[in-house]
Amino acid sequence: MSTELTDDSGQAFTRLYQDHHSWLLMWLEKRVQDRLQAEDHAHDTFMRVIGSKEIPNLNEPRAYLTTIAKRLLINHWRRNTIERAYLERLAVYPEEVAVSPEESSIILEVLREIDELLNQLPAKVRQAFLLAQLDDLTYAEIGQKLGVSDRMVRKYMAQAMFQCLSAGF
């Protein structure tokens, strides 16, 4: 992704950064309770802005920045949840069956790739897949949680599985 901005966009980005970086950092720090994580998320937020082709003419720049930051936080929390679930399951295996740190790292990377893949699916499809795979719920239980029929859960699962298979998982 190119990070080159036109002169006008570069000036707009500079103004946006100078005017709102400190505020965004404080906003993020309140949510993550960690200065370093807040700095990382603020950096990532502004990198997303740079990554866009043009800096939009913003009437509400803070709303724009918080929308980007919230999406980044959700992705971060979701990845952490997946990683924690994997590590919890891994912890119940006897030591002789446990995977090496290298294998664990590879598995976590694959899980992150699957997470990115699932993030492209509609919300209910993603939820159904995660409930089945991570929580071991039946289709009936998933249907109750999502407020849909068993048949719809089957369709959701087929869609998620097709997406995974198409990507080589």
Image (cartoon, helix red, strand yellow):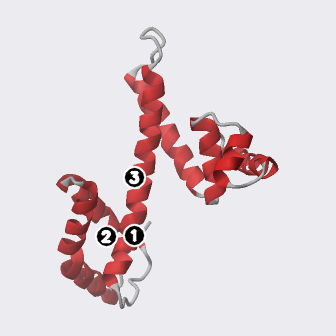
Query: Residue 46 bears which disc, if any?
Result: 2
Q: Quadrant of the N terminus?
A: bottom left
User: In front: mark 2 or mark 1?
Assistant: 1
- Residue shown at the point (35%, 86%) measured from the top left: 60
Q: Earlier in the sequence, mark 3 or mark 1?
A: 1
Q: Is residue 50 visible?
A: no
Q: Amino acid at mark 1?
A: Ile
Task: Calculate the distance from the C-alpha at mark 2 to the C-alpha at mark 1.
Answer: 9 Å
Question: Residue tagged by mark 3?
Answer: 76
Residue 62 sits in which quadrant?
bottom left
Q: Please tell me how crowded label 1 is: few (under 14), some (14-19), or many (20+) other residues with Cα within 10 Å.
A: some
Secondary structure category for the residue under label 3:
helix
Mark 2, Cα crowd under 10 Å, few <14 / some 14-19 / many 20+, is some
Residue 102 pos. (x, y %): 40, 25
At label 2, which amino acid type do we have? Phe
Neighbour tally class for label 3: few under 14, some 14-19, many 20 plus, Cα within 10 Å: few
Q: Which residue corresponds to mark 1? A: 68
Label 3–label 1 contact, CB within 8 A: no
Residue 6 visible from this viewpoint: yes
Q: Position of residue 134 (x, y in %)?
A: 57, 36
- Image check: 164 left or right of 83? right
Disc 2 on helix, strand or loop?
helix
Mark 3 and mark 2 lie on one chain; the one further toward the N terminus is 2
Q: Which mark is residue 112?
A: none
Mark 2 or 1, nearer chain start: 2
Residue 6, position as x, y percentages in the image: 35, 84
Q: Specify the amino acid type for callout 3.
A: His
